[in-house]
Image (cartoon, rainbow, N blue to C red):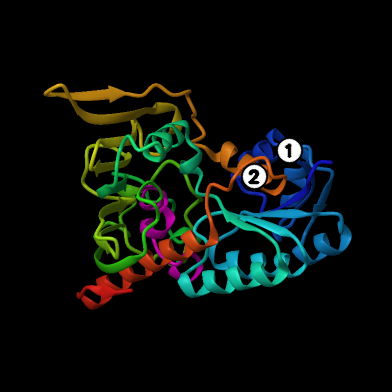
Amino acid sequence: MSIKTAVIGAGGMLQYHSAGFRQAGAEIVAVADAAPGAASKAAAKWDIPTAYDSVEAMLLGSPEIEAVSIIVPNKFHKSLAIQCLEAGKHVFSEKPPALNAAEVEEMIAAADKAGKKILFNYNNRARPESQAMMRYIQDGTVGRINSAQAKWIRRTGIPGFGGWFTNKELSGGGPLIDLLHMVDLAMYFMGYPEPAHVLGQTFSDFIQDKNFKGPWGIPDREGGVTDVENAAHGFVTFKTGQVLSLQVSWAEMIKREEVSVVFQGTKAGGKVERLFGIDGIDSTAIDTCELYVQENGHSVNRSITTPVCEDMGRIGSAANFIDTLTGKAEPFNTPEQSLRLMQVIDAIYASAASGKPVSI
């Protein structure tokens, strides 16, 4: 019997959630969105039988729903997740998990109390390159990863001015919290160690400059708030002795958009990378997956060939949520990992504000 699902939010990510759910055999029975007419339009476009203008109406009108995905501005992730968990639904939420680590703790407590699962859409874990690399890590080829470097950097990628992306109250921050995927992926490869100390800095030189607007996101909002960073850099030490450096930006003086994790293990190094020809345009990207080893006195670089995945794992990540519920797969992430990730992000912002290292 298929899992009956619903989606909260009629934005662009709906296409991937719906495709992933259906790929895993789930049935999408409803979509809800507070914007007038948005749910009805999405329902017609993506062949969803019922549309609602509120979450309350959806939970009341479609009690057969077993699982819900959440695709809304970051500020509402926590409240909607808890509302759905308390209504007895499993939850799959877009990233970031919430605005901060304290909110994630509330979400974990609600899931535990309800006896339901909550997973988050770190879709880059589902990319073929990431899963191929993880198999080399798990089989011992890489050894212990001592250090890693995480990047998601853009030259012109500010997602609109004055909308919710650039409003800290609604988003929680700028690119550091929006483009957290490579920080997550690096920690995933490293075994998600417990963070110990963080040093970070943020930069806002270009956040008001429309020359740095990206080709995606939402339209500019006249009179809206733009009060987040355009770039963040940081360094994390873990209680295991492992270390991570990170660079995340919407707007920075670089050659091109780069999405990558590079790491150095005790037996091998490696890289998972996506380079864009045009910032934010998936069809211009080139993906690579490589291992670096020493063999017979030679430095050997192995190129790992994986299937093309233009959607960056978004469909596979949503499918994994359903497969987790049906027992066909292990989850790509856990709530505890999300808590550690948000602890790191909180600490980078705190370090940037104080000018001092932060202990977790």
Q: Which mark is residue 46?
A: 1
Left or right relative to 68: residue 239:
left
Asked whether disc 2 touches disc 1, contact meaning CB atoms under 8 Å apart, the reply is yes
Q: Residue at x 32, y 62 (%)?
A: 229
Q: How many labels does the image show?
A: 2
Q: What residue type is labelled 1?
A: Trp
Indicate left or right for 358 with 89 as reference.
Answer: left
| Residue identifier under label 2 | 14
Q: From the image, which quarter does the C terminus lie in?
A: bottom left
Relative to 83, residue 317 above or below: above
Of callouts 2 and 1, the N-terminal one: 2
Residue 26 position, x and y percent, is 76, 41
- Position of 219 compared to 343: left or right? right
In the image, residue 22 sits, relative to residue 162, either above or below, namely above
Q: Residue at x 66, y 58 (%)?
A: 117
Q: x%, y% of residue 68? A: 71, 55
Magenta residues, start to end: 168-187
- Which is nearer the eye, 38 or 114? 114
Q: Can residue 232 be seen from the camera position used here?
A: yes
Reply above or below: 113 against 123.
below
| For residue 179, side relative to residue 126 (left or right) | left
Residue 176 covered by magenta stretch: yes
What amino acid is at disc 2? Leu
Q: What element carries label 2?
A: helix
**Magenta stretch containing residue 15, yes or no?**
no
Residue 163 visible in the snapshot: no
Residue, x 61% and y 54% (percent of image)? Answer: 71
